[in-house]
Image (tube, rainbow, N blue to C red):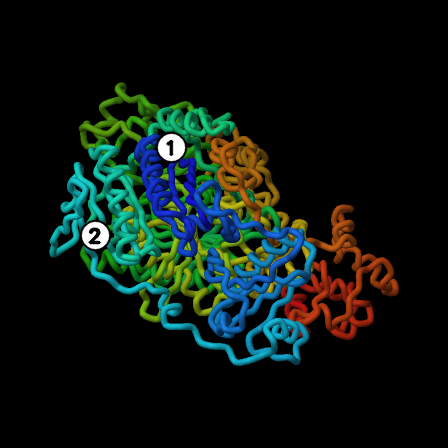
Amino acid sequence: MGDSYIILKTTALKNGSFRHDIHYWLGKDTSQDEAGTAAILTVELDAALGGRAVQYRESQGNETEKLLSYFRPCIMPQPGGVASGFNHVEVNEQEHVTRLYVCRGKHVVHVKEVPFARSSLNHDDIFILDTKSKIFQFNGSNSCIQERGKALEVVQYIKDTFHEGKCEVAAVEDGKLMADAEAGEFWALFGGFAPLPRKTASEETGEETEAAVKLLCFNQGQLEPIGFESLTHDLLETNKCYLLDCGAQMYVWMGRTTSLQQRKGASEAAEKLLTGDSRTKSHVMKMIEGYETVTFKSKFNEWPPTPDLKLSSEDGRGKVAALLKSQGLDVKGLMKSAPVTEEPESYIDCTGHLQVWRVNGNAKTLLASSEQSKFYTGDCYIFQYTYTGEDKEECLIGTWFGNKSVEEERVSAISLASKMVQAAKFQATMARLYEGKEPIQFFVIFQSLQVFKGGLSSGYKKFIAENGLDDDSYSEAGLALFRIQGSGPENMQAIQVDAVSSSLNSSYCYILHDGNSVFTWIGNLTTSLDQELIERQLDAIKSDLPSRSQKEGRETDKFWELLGGKVKYSNKKIETEQESDPRLFSCILPKDGNLRVKEIYHFTQDDLIAEDVFVLYCHSYIFVWFGQEVDAKVKTQAMDIGEKFLVRDFLRENLSRETTIFTVSEGSEPQFFTRFFTWDSAKSLMHGSSYQRKLAILKGGATKLLDKPKRRTPAVSGRGAAQDKAQRSRSMSTSPECHRVRGRSPAFAALTSAFEKPSTRNLSTPPPAVKKLFPKSTGPDTSKEAAISELTSSLEGPLKRTIPKSVKASQEAGKTIQEEDGAGDDEPEDDEGRTVFPYERLVTTSEDPAPDIDITQREIYLSAAEFREKLAMRRTAFYKLPKWKQNKLKSAVQLF
């Protein structure tokens, strides 16, 4: 508390550069000289790193959420100081001092020690009482469930840090009096129960008041106010430093051409202003021109788009390495060059079962297997894809909107797809896709896709008729030009473009046909892979006619004649939106419809709270995740929340409203979502509120995570196990007549196609090679983390759970509890070798819960007699039921 500290957080970005955040933290007992020195040293550190860091002033008890996110679960400053003119407080290590703390915060926790007295308690906050033998958490009656769950992380931290994990934990609810044993014990420490006081006005407001925004310029050590009618970017000059005073937040902006002395002077002036006005609790952020934060830009009425300024990889790595090496840190690996950009992984099994519907007005029409990879740009489609995930059967339900599709059918498609997801009890992931913005997952699901001009739907036909437009829908006998693109046989597309020479591009191959004439055009910048794909797409578009190859620069007159003559065309690859570094936002959609978002820094899986909705932002697409405890009405608004997030463009990146949106339910997360986290599937399969889950884990003293759960069959399939198994081995068509056939491998389908249809020409290329479907997830962007793993240490979440030894042993032997119980329906049941607890200790509402149990399978700890009594059947019969029915029966007796 008597010291000042500087914290440097370095993050490796996908573009190969580093982002630096520098925080200087001021203890409540630090001297003004130390505080001023910390501010100046922070400016010097920023200069040493190239002048690109954002600097934050942090005061004890008023830290930013970004700083607190580095030190999970909390910061608990110690009294005293080090060589700072303060006398170090000597604490008797042999005697435990009873302390009372107040905890606030849903996502990160602000912990403050308060006097150990009844007057410190209130109904709105959460308090932790740390005694020698027991830690109590007191939950104010007005506190929210999310804050209670985060406070339990602090309880775990105190238990592990100050009690070596050897003390009892008790949760006390506000309103429970002496009748509850733990509540009675808690109140006895305060001398008995008495009514609690209300929070003071200053506590309720947090001493944050609305203040008029002021802009001041630093000029020769003085702050000069600048008058303005509208706060715009034009007010800032690149050779000056400015202070933007917004009351609770203060921003120091330093022009790109300002000197180090100017920046130091601006920093000192800001520190003096805070001290003079007794505004020590204000947050101060300092930034260099070109590296402004989103919150700073949002204060201005307009802010022009700025180029993506990157820290030169070699220059930045050299400076960081030299600085940290001087501090005795190992910087091995930091000087490696940035990884080469590769084709993105899909993280999805491409051998699942696919169904596709075309939207016609307010209804949908199922397409035959041979037609399901043929889309029209004037139509909307719905697809359902079931596949094998890492831990369970997964389902993806999506909509695809052609560029020329009509709004009425887009609305209808979303409505129909949403009903399919609701029918699946939100266990399916939903996707909203626009033509030209599709993610890699969409392409590998379809493998070979053709997108034609025009449309076949009733809505499209009606639209062109009402507006007197020509119907340019694709005709096999007509003139058509296709651009061929993709990364391989399992990801290739033929896109119909205007049949004119300006549509050509030297980086692509094309197919041109007119009646019986078929040409292939090979651009000079294409690869052998591109040329292989054009042969495969010929099999899908014109498999029954020979083609004439045209190499760029050696075309025939007939080729140019079909395209209306030769004109200038491009040679640059069409750029697609790239995935950015992921960012997580908590979202609230109030009744007024104005979406409120809050960024979660340095996020982990534990930040996904069961009661809330979150957006995981990756620029080229976003995920809307909602927890199990979210209201059913809010779940149905998940897609709407994603659309509002795009419209608001919180990060000011000119997001397209056509950006892909995925909606994801807790417990049904696909791997292409979980790869952004160090993911433990057992956590998302737990039930109850976030507070109940953590309390059950904490009281049980769990230290290990649950082993991988048994695969679950989704409620959306509607097919038998034999059908599912057969459909997983679907293969990709190589001609329009040889569609996916159940039970056939890709190689077998390609081989037999020539015999099944002897009139067609031979396949022009061999069948696609079988590739690895997707890699196992090992955590978020491990290749990037390797660059700075030697510089930082990560803190694991304090809360983990175990599985009983008896269950774990059976799983390691390759058996599940269900399989053991199902062996021999006629054999008598007994409890020998089974861990058994009374029913009263296994229910979800138990006040004395059984320790060290798998709370997702509470019924396995019932005795044989109680199992039959409560569930009205034997174990063998129970485990033959569908999973959903098991859960329904367990819910009825409070075991789920």
SS class of the residue under badge 2?
loop
Q: Nearer the viewer, residue 823 or 446?
A: 823
Question: Is the residue under label 1 in contact with that under label 2 (CB below 8 Å)?
Answer: no
Q: Residues within 10 Å of mark 2 (few under 14, many from 20)?
A: few
Query: Residue 17 has which mark?
Result: 1
Q: Is residue 626 above or below residue 552?
A: below
Residue 871 lies left or right of residue 506; in this view the side is right
Query: Which comes before the other along the chain, label 2 or label 1?
Result: 1
Q: Residue at x 63, y 65 (%)?
A: 884
Q: Which residue is mark 2?
A: 300
**What amino acid does circle 1 point to?**
Ser
Q: Nearer the viewer, residue 490 or 546?
A: 490
Q: Residue at x 67, y 72 (%)?
A: 847
Query: Residue 746 has which mark?
Result: none
Q: Residues within 10 Å of mark 1 (few under 14, many from 20)?
A: many
Q: Quadrant of the C terminus?
A: bottom right
**What amino acid does circle 2 point to?**
Phe
Q: Residue at x 75, y 46 (%)?
A: 812
Residue 24 lies left or right of residue 566; in this view the side is right
Q: Is residue 149 above or below residue 519?
A: below
Q: Residue at x 39, y 44 (%)?
A: 23
Instruction: State the image coordinates of residue 513 (x, y, percent, origin top left).
Output: 31, 34
Instruction: State the image coordinates of residue 656 (x, y, percent, origin top left).
Output: 29, 49
Q: Is residue 673 above or below residue 342?
A: below
